[in-house]
Amino acid sequence: MTNYWPLLGIALVVAGFALRLNPMLVVTAAAILTGLLGGMDVIEVISTFGKAFNDNRIIAIVWIVLPVIGLLERHGLQQRAATLIRGFKNATTGRLLILYLIYRQLTAAIGLHSTAGHPQTVRPLVAPMALAAAEKQHGELDEDTAEKVKAYSAATDNVGLFFGEDIFFAIGSIVLIQQTLVTYGYNLAPLELALWAIPTAICAFLIHGTRLLLFDRSLKRRAP
Amino acid sequence: MITLHWLYVLAGMMFAAFALLSALDRANPRRFGNAAFWGLMALSLLGGDFIGDFGNGLLVLGLAGLAGFGLIGRSHPPTTSEEERQAWSERLGNKLFLPALIIPATALLGTLLYNYTPLGDTGLFEAKRETYVLLGLGVLLALATIFVWLKPPALAPLQEGRRLIDAIGWAAVLPQMLAALGVLFAAAGVGTIIGELTQAIIPRGNVFLTVAVFGLGMAMFTIIMGNAFAAFPVMAAAIGVPLLIQGYGGDPAVVGAVGMLAGFCGTLMTPMAANFNLVPAALLELKDQYGVIRAQIATALPMLAVNILIIYLAAFR
């Protein structure tokens, strides 16, 4: 008879995240509950969790890049990124967002995900530029259209980040995949994993880029 | 031989410095919480092999407690002003991006050289981990370059690093916690249970259907939990490893890497991932708080299909 009780650990993670409890506490509670239901005693559970944390220390080493990024920010990296993005003007809304998608994917792929983001670039630069481009071409925008332009700006940032960052090997997700698979005896090199993020990145560019061009067309139709 | 332990020492010293600078930072009302949190991370990296499994377990409970009960806060270490940064940016131009490029370039070129030239026979680096060691080397080279070029104050890299790590906070440790949770799931047999249940539902030997269930499961779990990192250990234990890799001989690199990306498609569609989906809606003053998600669904769904196809086509060549 299979013991199904350890599945409650997953339920606890789901419930804890849904209730917006602190994820560090949720994960710890879920680990302890799962271990206890799996037949371990308290000492054994804490030891197993501690050993697993220690075995996965490699995930923490991705943060050694922070002093470099911080130093470059000190010397105006964010401002430089902003200047670069401002240079995308004189394009239609869709083309401007495609340029930003390329910028986001390429910089994320070399570990510079922090040069852009919703507070850093989308709110102050990308969304206003996209709105301005739409107004220049189609005149005054109605409220629904303006909302859509802003929503597409934020969406483009997310798509570029998600489908660019895994090409950089020293990122949490890649190291997490590697360490999870090591548990089962599959010892992969980080670049093997990062390499397999490339086909998806290209498809994401093609799919989202096509949608942005179609968005340009729909803007044209909306124009009075 | 240069092993990962060298890197743990490097990272551990960095966290120890963060802890020390936190403790001295009178401007942060929670300075001792921050000092304790980063101090525990330093202890883990520097001494994790000497304090025993139970000691490590207590260390993790300490981290979770400090984070979970709000004992760590955001700091504001000394840095440059907006105006100074603008002036630097204009003076330095796009060359500012170059030091950051040193890191991936060192890791990539180094790895290629090490693996495809006789250099690899020297056994200089720990096997399969040379890229991480080279990452450390790249960071040191980038730091040296910046120091020669821009001559920042000696403490600047640590203070700027602390500024960024405090902005990330406990979320910096979450991926490691989730990986440890995955180990607990595996030890308690969660993977076996879900694997059996799935096998009962999916017809035996139907590789495509199994891949589809894996991809959809990654996306679904991510939608529920708001986090693909949390979904990955669960789905790897349930379907990825027992069925796709062990059962049907799938390539673990493809199953792992693209499986995670299938989860990211879920992130694009869930209000649970507030940072990516709800916060920008608020920042851009959208009337519809789900406006960003609505703009993403038509990219996320085809991307999910694409990822499932990539796993099916590439993992079972």
Image (cartoon, coloured by chain):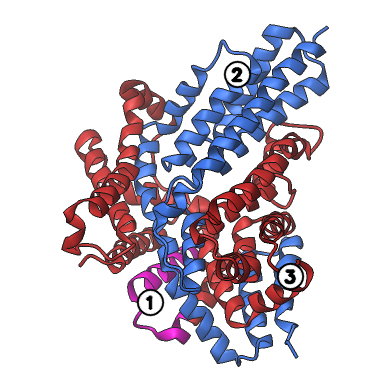
| Residue B19, horizontal then vertical, whole percent | 39, 63
Residue occupying image coordinates x 43% and y 71%: B40
Circle 1 sits on which residue?
B48
Q: Is label 3 in a helix, a strand or a loop?
A: helix
Asked if both marks, 2 and 1, belong to the same chain, the answer given is no
**Does residue B54 show up magenta in the picture?**
yes
| Residue B233, horizontal then vertical, whole percent | 59, 66
Observer-nearest of A80 and B6 = B6
Residue A90 visible at all = yes
Label 1, label 3: how far apart the Cα atoms are: 38 Å
Main SS of the magenta part reads helix
| Residue B177, horizontal then vertical, whole percent | 54, 68
- Front: mark 2 or 1: 2
Residue B228 image-quadrant placement: bottom right
Q: Which residues are magenta?
A: B31-56
Q: Is label 1 in a helix, a strand or a loop?
A: loop
Amino acid type assigned to the residue bearing label 2 in the image: Arg
Q: Residues within 10 Å of mark 3 (few under 14, many from 20)?
A: some
Amino acid type assigned to the residue bearing label 1 in the image: Gly
Circle 2 sits on which residue?
A95
Chain rendered red = B
Left-right relation of B283 to A168: right
Left-right relation of B140 to A59: left
Color of chain A here?
blue
Q: Using the image, determine if residue A71 lies above or below residue B197.
A: above
Left-right relation of A101 to B27: right
In which quadrant will I find the N terminus of chain B?
Answer: bottom left
Label 2, label 1: how far apart the Cα atoms are: 51 Å
| Residue A36, horizontal then vertical, whole percent | 65, 87
Amino acid type assigned to the residue bearing label 3 in the image: Thr
Circle 3 sits on which residue?
B198
